[in-house]
Image (cartoon, rainbow, N blue to C red):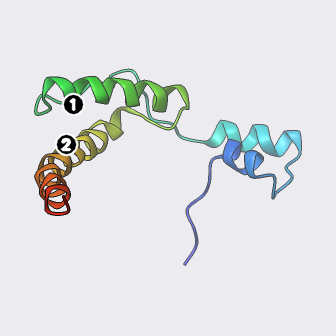
Amino acid sequence: MARPREPVDLIAAKGRKHLTIAEYVERKNAEITAPADKVKPPDFLLKKEKEKFDELAKQLVDLKIMTNLDCDVLARYIKAESEYIKVTKPVSYTHLRAHE
C-alpha cells in the first residue's frame, strides 16, 4: 500500500530527499491546503477548556499544522483530557492517603 504524500516542506525538513528548486516549486504549487481562518472552540467546551483550546490552536496555526477541519479533534482531545483529570484526581488522592 502506498503511503500518503507528504508536504514538500516536511520532506525538506527531514533532509532525506533532495529536490531541485524546480521540483520543490512544482510540488509546493500542487499542494492542497485547507484554510485556517475560522479556528474557534466548539460550544460544548467549558470556559477553561475554551481557553486551553485557544492557546493550543494558536500554536498549531502558527506552525501551519492546524486548519478549520481540525477544530473538533482538538476540542475532543481537550474534553477527554479534562474528563481524565477529573476521574483520576480522586484515585490519586486516595492512593496517596493509603500510604500515609
In the rendered view, does 57 fall on the left or right side of 82?
right
Task: Give how far across and how far down residue 86 sits, in percent.
Answer: 13, 46
Task: Give how far across and how far down residue 27 sits, in percent.
Answer: 71, 44
**Foreground residue among 47 and 67:** 47
In the rendered view, does 16 fall on the left or right side of 44?
right
**Foreground residue among 81 and 12:** 81
Query: Amino acid under label 2?
Result: Ser
Query: Is 61 drawn above or below residue 90 in the view shown?
Result: above
Q: Of all residues shown, which one is farthest toward the bottom?
A: 1
- Mark 1 and mark 2 residues within 8 Å of each other at the beta carbon: yes
Query: Amino acid under label 1?
Result: Glu
Few, some or many residues within 10 Å of mark 2 (<14, 14–19, 20+): some
From the image, tell me which residue sits under label 1. Answer: 49
- Find residue 98 and report its image quarter: bottom left
Label of residue 82 in the image? 2
Residue at 30% in and 28% down? 52
Quadrant containing the N terminus in the rendered view: bottom right
Task: Give how far across and how far down residue 38 sits, in percent.
Answer: 32, 22
